[in-house]
Amino acid sequence: MSKKPNVRESALNLLETIEKNQSYSNLLLNNVIKKNDINAKDVGLLTELTYGTLQRKMTLDFYLQPFLNNKKKIESWVIQLLRLTLYQMVYLDKIPDRAAIFEAVEIAKRRGHKGIAGVVNGVLRSIQREGLPSLDTITDQAERLSVETSHPVWLVKRWINQLGYDKAKEMCEINLTAPLQTGRVNTARISREECLKKLQDEGFQVEESPIIPEAIKCLKGNLANSNAFKEGYVTIQDESSMLVAYALGLEQGETVLDACAAPGGKSTHIAEKLQNTGQVISLDLHEHKVKLIGENAERLGLTNIETRALDSRKVQEHFSKETFDRILLDAPCSGLGVMRRKPDMKYTKKEQDVAQLHTIQLSLLHSVAPLLKKGGILVYSTCTVDQEENEHVMKLFLKENQDFEEDSSVSDRMPKAIRPLMNDFDLQILPQDFGSDGFYIASLRKKV
Ligand SMILES: C[S@@+](CC[C@H](N)C(=O)[O-])C[C@H]1O[C@@H](n2cnc3c(N)ncnc32)[C@H](O)[C@@H]1O
């Protein structure tokens, strides 16, 4: 009978799969936890080891490099094992170095042979003896920040150019920390106070968000496992995403198009804000994704959402001009604002991806624009922090669509705490602003 892998072996297996398949770390981790029925204590350690090692990959490689110089070609699983162990030695106070090294050597013996175990032991003991190489040898500012915070140098340079060094540095640093889980209370069914009470009675450590009236912070536990979630009182959503429904300035009874809607986080928020009146038409490319919107709506008891699998670049074939009071385009994007949640993205994204997205974002905007009623509001949002996908897209769209104008009243609709961050008609949230995802929201109005 095969023995269940221990936590470090599971972390090693995960790191290998993530690197080979370039699969999303968050999805893989959840699958492994479910499949191996890992207990709560070990889930914490497995998450820390996997995410931590991934988050710090480039820094760990910088530290390892001088100790690997004279070694013949080392297999990739051994490199992963060295990264994983060095991560524990450098960043985790609770695990003594000797325990981390002992475990690594045992894994190397089981997975490889005595020779490999000897290499692993030798490299780790040398680091322990000689200490880590100094980052001060890197003189270029961008390169140093890249290695120090484990972000590709093209991205660091891009952020320094767009935001300045200090903001770029803050963002790289916060990307190394674990995000807090936040939830959105379904105010069509329950007040925030009552929902908090329900969750507290279930043993969750939750509190009000000071930023958004219907948001809660979950300090301990996973809201997805709560009865309040299963019974449709709460949805797991980042606070930045919750601002989109505010920007739309919804009024009861309105007809709203959500053109890129799956899995339905924002559609369901809109439907809740409409208090189950009006109609939300939620589109996404594929049937299986659209199904998720329906499932979420059902869980939340929302009956004002209609879903369709559709390429939103073809919406004009399906809906008449000036059908909708509000349109949301929560566009496909590079996701550079959510790197904390998906650290593997740091190493898989390429600079040319950003330029390609810009084209589809604009074409989606052009397609949905005629469907908006005169005087209606079009909100464009992304979970990225890149100007090319955000401000530049807006600028081009406005230039080519003279029947739209910047909607400077959007600030009045936002929660008070957000207003100081707003520009005239748009808002770029950085993860360091209040700990939420990096996110962009712009509001445009169709001229009357
Ligand atoms: C940022 S996600 C949407 C998240 C969603 N608004 C939410 O809050 O749950 C972008 C979505 O756009 C969809 N998408 C990409 N291209 C599309 C297109 N041409 N037509 C419709 N949906 C598209 C993707 O499938 C993806 O689900």
Image: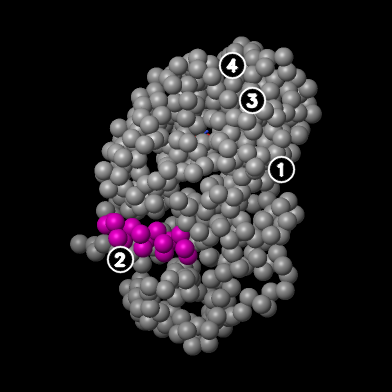
| For the residues bearing labels 2 and 1, Cβ distance under 8 angstroms | no
- Give how far across and how far down residue 401 sits, in percent: 76, 24
- Give the mark, 2 or 3, whose residue is nearer the N terminus: 2
Mark 3: few/some/many CA within 10 Å (<14, 14-19, 20+): many
Disc 3 target residue: 378
- Give the mark, 1 or 3, whose residue is nearer the N terminus: 3
Question: Which structural element holds mark 3?
Answer: strand
- Give how far across and how far down residue 68 sits, in percent: 54, 79
Disc 1 target residue: 388
Disc 4 target residue: 324
Q: Which residue ends up furthest to the bottom in the rendered image?
A: 129
- Give the mark, 1 or 4, whose residue is nearer the N terminus: 4
| For the residues bearing labels 3 and 4, Cβ distance under 8 angstroms | no
* Above or below: residue 196 compared with residue 277: below
* Above or below: residue 335 compared with residue 121: above
- Give the mark, 2 or 1, whose residue is nearer the N terminus: 2
Q: Nearer the viewer, mark 1 or mark 3?
A: 3
Closest to the observer: 105 or 230? 230
